[in-house]
Amino acid sequence: MSDDAFTTRSEEPASQDFADQEPEDAMAEGSPEAADAGGDDGGGTGMLGPLELPSTGRMFVVVGGAAMALSTLLSWLEVGNDSFPNIAGVGVSTFGVGTIVFLAGLLLVLRRLTSGVAMGIALGALGSTLVYITIVGLDNGLAAGVWVGLAGSAIAVLGALILVFEEEDRPQLQLRPSAAALGAALAVVASFWLDWVLNSSALIANRRTGEEAFNGLHSEVLFGFPILILGGIVLVLLTELTTMQTPFAKDRQQWIYLMIQMAGVAIAVTAGSNVVGLMMLGVFAFGSGPLVALVGGVIITRSIKEA
């Protein structure tokens, strides 16, 4: 009798331990870890998350940048009856404009830029292309590549504009007003006061002609016009900032910072296209105007930083 009682009491803990282990095993089988482990065998949802589609503005920027880059592989000038070989946009035939449009298009496609920088690059490429069309003239054999590049720049500008209003997590910007004012002043002065192209043949001929040097507003240069306009806009915006009550106009202040950033990048791109063109052309000496304007655009751009 005593042996049976001892045996019964010794088996009770074992049966209780086994009962306690069953819920744990069941929980282990239905745990998230087990579900993730089973996903490798096709039973789970897998490790792929939801596909993230680019925004409308970003798509326009990429499409416009691709059109800009591809346009420079097309003919920009028609020479002869069939324009063969192809006078493409990258080279001396476009005064450096095609090269800048090509590089700007690749940058818009390959880099995920902020809305301000993308807008500045697209505006600079658009302005440079318009200047090139004005210099060459509509009746002097402009080919399809010019118009493709112009359309691509316009699409990129539209996409950057949409991106400005789509960005909800736009970083807060900080501005150094003194640096921005210095860069804008350099760009404005360089556009009309300094020489952009030196006529080397006239200088060698003991200054016998009346036009030894051309400024940025000359009819054969014209790159000073967009730089003068953009630099003036920056100066006007900086003047508005000095009269603004900062604690009550924080959002408006950020919009002004963004516009100054756009203008600075556009000035740098426009002046850079002229610098590249003068470096490619061998018949003219190098002027100081585009260099000073390029430095001014870089200073404006560097004066804007993320908070």
Image (tube, helix red, strand yellow):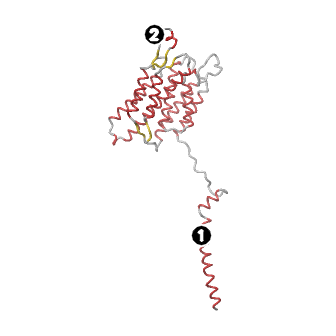
Q: Is the residue marked by circle 2 packed among few (<14), some (14-19), or many (20+) residues within 10 Å?
A: few
Q: Which residue is mark 1?
A: 24
The percent position of residue 278, horizontal first and vertical second, equals: 53, 21
Residue at x 47%, y 13% (from the top left corner)? 212
Q: Dot 2: what SS?
A: loop
Name the amino acid, label 2: Gly
Residue at x 62%, y 83% (from the top left corner)? 10
Q: Which residue is mark 2?
A: 210
The percent position of residue 144, horizontal first and vertical second, equals: 59, 24
Residue in front for this viewpoint, 249 or 204 = 204
Q: Dot 1: what SS?
A: helix
* Mark 1 or 2, closer to the camera: 2
In three-dimensional space, the C-alpha distance between marks 1 and 2, rounded to whole angstroms, equals 98 Å
Residue in front for this viewpoint, 227 or 193 = 193
Marks 1 and 2, the one that precedes in the sequence: 1
**Left-right relation of 179 to 112:** left
CB under 8 Å between discs 1 and 2: no
Residue at x 63%, y 19% (from the top left corner)? 83
Q: Which of the labelled discs sits on residue 2, or is there none? A: none
Q: Quadrant of the C terminus?
A: top left
The percent position of residue 133, horizontal first and vertical second, equals: 52, 21
Q: How many marks?
A: 2
Name the amino acid, label 1: Glu
Task: Say if 123 sits above or below 86 in the image.
Answer: below
